[in-house]
Image (cartoon, rainbow, N blue to C red):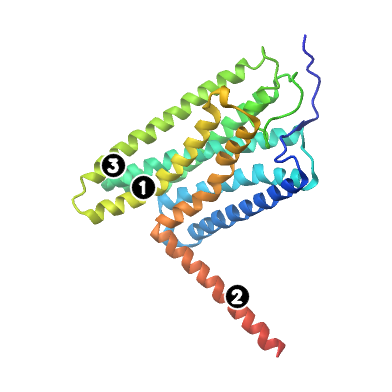
Amino acid sequence: MSNSSPISQFLLLPLADTRQLQLLHLWLFLGISLAALLGNGLIISAVACNHHLHTPMHFFLLNLSLTDLGCILTTVPKAMHNSLWDTTAVSYTGCAAQLFFFVFFMTAEFSLLTIMCYDRYVAICKPLHYGTLLGSRACAHMAAAAWASGFLYSLLHTVNTFSLPLCQGNALDQFFCEIPQILKLSCSHSCLREVGFIVVSVFLGLGCFIFIVFSYVQIFRAVLRIPSEQGRHKAFSTCLPHLAVVSLFVSTVMFAYLKPPSISSPSLDLALSVLYAVVPPVLNPLIYSLRNKELKDVLRKMMTGCCSVARTCQFSSVRCSE
């Protein structure tokens, strides 16, 4: 019979073997974190402070930026801490908290991407009903449902995962705590319940993916029926950022979790985890700001205003010194 002694900490996969590479990864992750914080912070500030952006699409974009910030702040700081202090340990409680918040933000993000697809579908295929179907109360309810579903889903998986007896050591082949790596440490006869939850989750995620694909088929059919080329271009320009974000999110997650076991390796798993957990929160603000003219104009005004204030303060300090 396998032993399942209590575990007080887990050992994460180091990002590099040498001290020089660890410090390199530290600075790389620091740059990624600052880029994600800056990009998503600007979008949140722009949408929250400018009444011209108080629309359903930008409201959901604000919520998406919050999930991106949550994903970055859940995984990257601990990896940076371990690289700085040359350690791989994470406490049992810290691992559980990291898993909970990561699943929470990832689930909420996918739910919000599905809702944003519905927003684009109504705006293009049912424009006369847009104000009725996506009023302020309906948008608030949908956003609350996305956050609540992420919370309940994450709580269910976290409690069930950490209730399993672990008898395969405490080393995780990942730079942060995630469900598949912890299941590898559980006793083989005790993880069937969590596997069942994952199967159900796959079907739910597949349902959302099918909804997104079906919606975009209808959207493209409606766009192609628009007589003017300028109208078609405008309609496509509102959909392309969302389609790019969905494609990046779904493709990286699906390849990471559904790849054949024969090509699995710690280095490949590490690279894929960075792709779906770290890269999207950095690219999403860039994708949306480049293709969204209203948001781009507001951000430009914000940056211009900040530069003007900085020049004024600098000029005032020079006058005072004189």
Percent position (x, y) of residue 297? 43, 64
Circle 1: is it few (<14), some (14-19), or many (20+) Cα within 10 Å? many
The residue depicted at 74 percent of the width and 20 percent of the height is: 168
Q: Amino acid at mark 3?
A: Phe
Most extreme residue toward the left is: 227
Percent position (x, y) of residue 154? 60, 32
Label 3 sits on residue = 220
Label 2 to label 3: alpha-carbon separation: 45 Å
Horizontal placement of 29 versus 293: left or right?
right
Figure check: 36 above or below 171 = below
Local secondary structure at mark 3: helix
Query: Pointer 2 and pointer 3: residues touching (CB < 8 Å)?
Result: no
Circle 2: is it few (<14), some (14-19), or many (20+) Cα within 10 Å? few
Q: Which callout, 3 or 1, points at the residue further toward the start of the chain?
A: 3
Q: Amino acid at mark 1?
A: Cys
Horizontal placement of 146 versus 240: left or right?
right
State the mark number for residue 56: none
Q: Which callout, 2 or 3, points at the residue further toward the start of the chain?
A: 3
Q: Amino acid at mark 2?
A: Ala
For the C terminus, give its image quadrant: bottom right
Label 3 to label 1: alpha-carbon separation: 10 Å
Query: Where is residue 263, by image quadrant?
Result: top right
Local secondary structure at mark 1: helix
Q: Which callout, 2 or 1, points at the residue further toward the start of the chain?
A: 1
Percent position (x, y) of residue 151? 58, 35
Please say whether residue 145 is visible from this viewpoint: no
Label 2 sits on residue = 310
Label 1 sits on residue = 239
Label 2 to label 1: alpha-carbon separation: 36 Å
The residue depicted at 55 percent of the width and 38 percent of the height is: 106
Local secondary structure at mark 2: helix
The residue depicted at 50 percent of the width and 31 percent of the height is: 254
